[in-house]
Amino acid sequence: MSTTTSAPVHSVAPVVLPTPDRAVDLRLRVSAPTTGSELPIILLSHGQGPSNHLSSLNGYAPLVNYWAAHGFVVIQPTHLSSRTLNLASGDPEAPLYQRSRAEDMTRILDRLDEIEDAVPQLRGRLDRSKVAVAGHSMGGHTASLLLGARYTDPRSGAEVDLTESRISAGVLLAAPGRGGDAVTGFVAEHYPFFLSTDFSAMATPALVVAGDKDSSTHLTVRGPEWHTDPYFLSPGRKTLLTLFGAEHGLGGISGYDVAETTDENPDRVAAVQRLTWAYLRSELNPGDTAWQVACGELALGRVEEK
């Protein structure tokens, strides 16, 4: 399916997976084109912005609708960190639930049969051999863990490895960078797991998307380059897309007309839509030229590859 050919999108929510070992059952949105078969899957992890509902299965419509209209099945969980759940803070992983977020994605892959039963329009149409993960901001951290990044549990001192071998590619959107002296004192005090972020084993192919004006001063002392760490500090095939003039919202990817977007730019959102779709299409289908074509038409940023 090309960028000039899109299908109507069928979106179902909430799809509820009973999860007794979780604080609440896992709730999902599933979006797919109304036509087509052998559809690849994108697992999308939401961020932690100030809005109440964007950090849930109800966010990121500009990306979800585009990806689904152009041939992907997009599955969005509401992570335990979502404001929509308003969970008590007694859990030692609160408020960001960094491990649980990644485990949500593994649960989804384990239970695709149940998801097909809940969304019968999908039955028999998934290509389970082609799975990607994408995430914005904190969701980018979640995606990086599934791609092979590690951190040290600040309570136990044990290294946490949540790599998911069924995921073949990833997209990290304004994702956090390395820990140590790169993060602020606020982060070290409130989110100590960030101190040990390590990309040295993140070998799965990924597209890292960063804005050259994304300072994130509450998180890092290094400025916009911090968000490029997943590209420069990881092994294997990686691609970096730097968007000119972009701040943390990358033009407004978390929702339509979102007040918290500080760099609202429909053209920039369109570039993110097209380039992320093209990257995953070509990465999951060797020989496909969508990525090459999209890069050739890029005017709002630059691409590096290694």
Image (cartoon, helix red, strand yellow):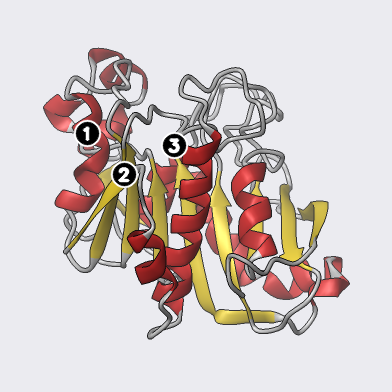
Name the residue at 28% across, 22% down.
Answer: 215
Q: Secondary structure at mark 1?
A: helix
- For label 3, the residue is 138
Q: Secondary structure at mark 3?
A: helix
The CA distance from mark 2 to mark 3 is 23 Å
Closest to the observer: 41 or 292? 292
Identify the mark at residue 301; answer none if there is no mark: 2
- Cβ–Cβ below 8 Å for labels 2 and 3? no
Closest to the observer: 95 or 230? 230
Task: Give residue 210's position: percent from left, percent from top.
Answer: 32, 40
- For label 1, the residue is 226
Does residue 109 show up? yes
Quadrant, the C terminus: bottom left
- Determine which quarter of the picture holds residue 1: bottom right
Label 2 vs 3, first from the N-terminus: 3
Marks 1, 2: nearer the viewer: 2
Q: Secondary structure at mark 2?
A: strand
- Cβ–Cβ below 8 Å for labels 3 and 1? no
Label 1 vs 2, first from the N-terminus: 1
Q: Amino acid at mark 3?
A: Met
Does residue 166 show up? no
Q: Amino acid at mark 1?
A: Trp
